[in-house]
Image: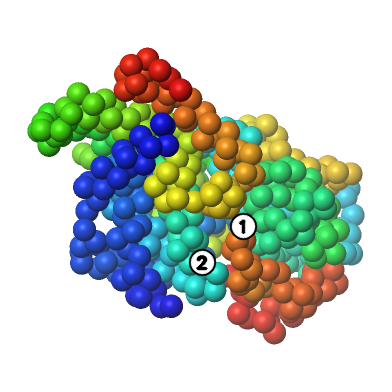
Amino acid sequence: MTFEEFVEARLQALLRYAVMLTGDPHTAQDLVQETMIRAQLQWRRIAAADLPERYVKRMLTNAYVDLRRGSWLRRVALRGVDLEAAVEPRAAGGYVHDHADSVVERDQMWLWLGRLPRRQRAALVLRYYEGLTDGEIAEVFDCPVGTVRSWISRALTTLRAQVAPALTGGDAA
Amino acid sequence: MMDHLLRDTFARHEELVPAAHPALRAAIFSGARRRRARRRWAWTGLLSALTVAAVLLTGPIFALPRHAAHDVASPARPIHLLLVGIDRTGRDQPAQVRANAIVLLHIDPARRAAYAVVVPHDLLLDLPGLGRERAEGAYLVGGYQLAADAMTGLTGVPLDGGAVVDVAAMEKITAAAGGVDLCVDRRVQSSHLADDGSRSPGYGHPAMVYEPGCRHFDAAEAVDYLRESVGSGDDRALRGYLVALARAASEPSRLPAVLAAAGSGLELHLGASSLAGVAGMLRGVEPGAMAGVRLPTAATAESGRPGRLPVPGGDGLYDALRSGKVGPWLAAHPAYGV
């Protein structure tokens, strides 16, 4: 598979994944752009791997986890702050005919996802959005499966404590 | 319950996903072309600290006054030091620091030559009790010692010592030397510093740009410039920095501060040798004469563990290291020159 074919086939999927990680389309595009530039530079090696997409996803995940203050992606952090403001109008405008209250609460979930440590959020996205097994997630992070499970369990505990009571009327199960 | 909520939340936010616009594709292809033109070999990673690490150990050592080393006899055999570069910045858990740069430094006092063998961070090594792991992971799991054991196991080269260097230490040492005078041959744009010297390029603060020409660099600028240049495969900047640091540090009024910064900033693993002893062995080597060598590797298609495998015998490099014949080996294998 050539790099061009890979871009054709997988760019949209990678953008989706990046949006779920970062919560923000602009940051997601920056992240995908940077990762794909790097991927092209080492494409021969990536293409030799069994699952080139998994390899690129791993690069993208690492780039996301490594976003630091003061780096070229500092604007990421700044945009992240806007997230809170962004939730409000969508909840009020887009879903008025749906169960408005519960949608607002569910967008709380999105908001709290954005506040999780990055590895925890990435692990949740890989498990619940990308549908990877814990073993596959561990390969993405190059760490033991137990570590992945502990990130996910800590993330779920946080989300249950912050979001679930509001949704389930206090039943945090 | 939570499973369902999470799946639902992610699915509903797919509406945020932008279309893969042609402009994005264009940016990817042109970005890669630009960088490839600057690179002699195409693996990225954080090479920044890599041969840079060599500077940190050798810079202050070169700066030692010669009389400090007069009583140390030059050994006939080459010596080997392992340098592990790490970047702790921004890590929430110090326990999860990987080595992003590993360099085997080969110093041959008899031939007045030094070579920096660059080990790819994704080199797959067989680690005692752990199976096949990446070189960067060896440091993560077992610290300097495991990384050193793994390299000795691979190459058969006995190590005389080594050091762990972090970007912050590099900056401290340069600051103690009072900054350095560097000559830039090619325009380099910083990804870490803004043009007013603050640490945050972003809106309203364009990134620092290093224009061609010679000038004085303060420590933050020098280290940043070096990370950018070495990261793009340019080791001339590194050699320039090495010479400049040695010159700045050998200023008698600066030397004590530089040695103190090196002593506190570097995690030294010199074993039986002392800093002065190593300095003695380094004595005839011109800092600017250090050459870079890429460790021979092959890509692996092994499932689940992308990385590189070492080539058996290192294509002759390991023998050359042990017998002190790296110069002729490199002449016969120019493709491995950095």
Gap between marks 1 and 2 measured at Cα: 20 Å
The answer, for residue A39, to whether it is visible in the render is yes
Percent position (x, y) of residue B192? 39, 44
**Front-most of A15 and B218?**
A15
The kind of residue tagged 1 is His
**Front-most of B270 and B98?**
B98
Q: Residue at x 89, y 59 (%)?
A: B75
Q: What element carries label 2?
A: loop
Q: Is mark 1 on a helix, strand or loop?
A: loop
Percent position (x, y) of residue B283? 76, 55
Vertical order, B32 against A90 (above or below): below
Q: Residue at x 72, y 74 (%)?
A: B311
**Front-most of A117 and B262?**
A117
Q: Residue at x 78, y 48 (%)?
A: B146
- Which dot, 1 or 2, sits closer to the camera? 2
A99 lies left or right of A31: left
Discs 1 and 2 share one subunit: no
A131 lies left or right of B66: left
Q: How many labels does the image show?
A: 2
Instruction: Identify the residue position indicated by label 1 in the image.
Output: B121
Q: Mark 2 lies on which chain?
A: A
Which quarter of the rendering shows the N terminus of chain B? top left
Label 1, residues with CA under 10 Å away: few <14, some 14-19, many ≥20: many
Instruction: Identify the residue position indicated by label 2 in the image.
Output: A51
Percent position (x, y) of residue A15? 31, 55
The kind of residue tagged 2 is Leu
Vertical order, B152 against A124 (above or below): below
Q: Which residue is drawn at 20% across and 62% down?
A: B21
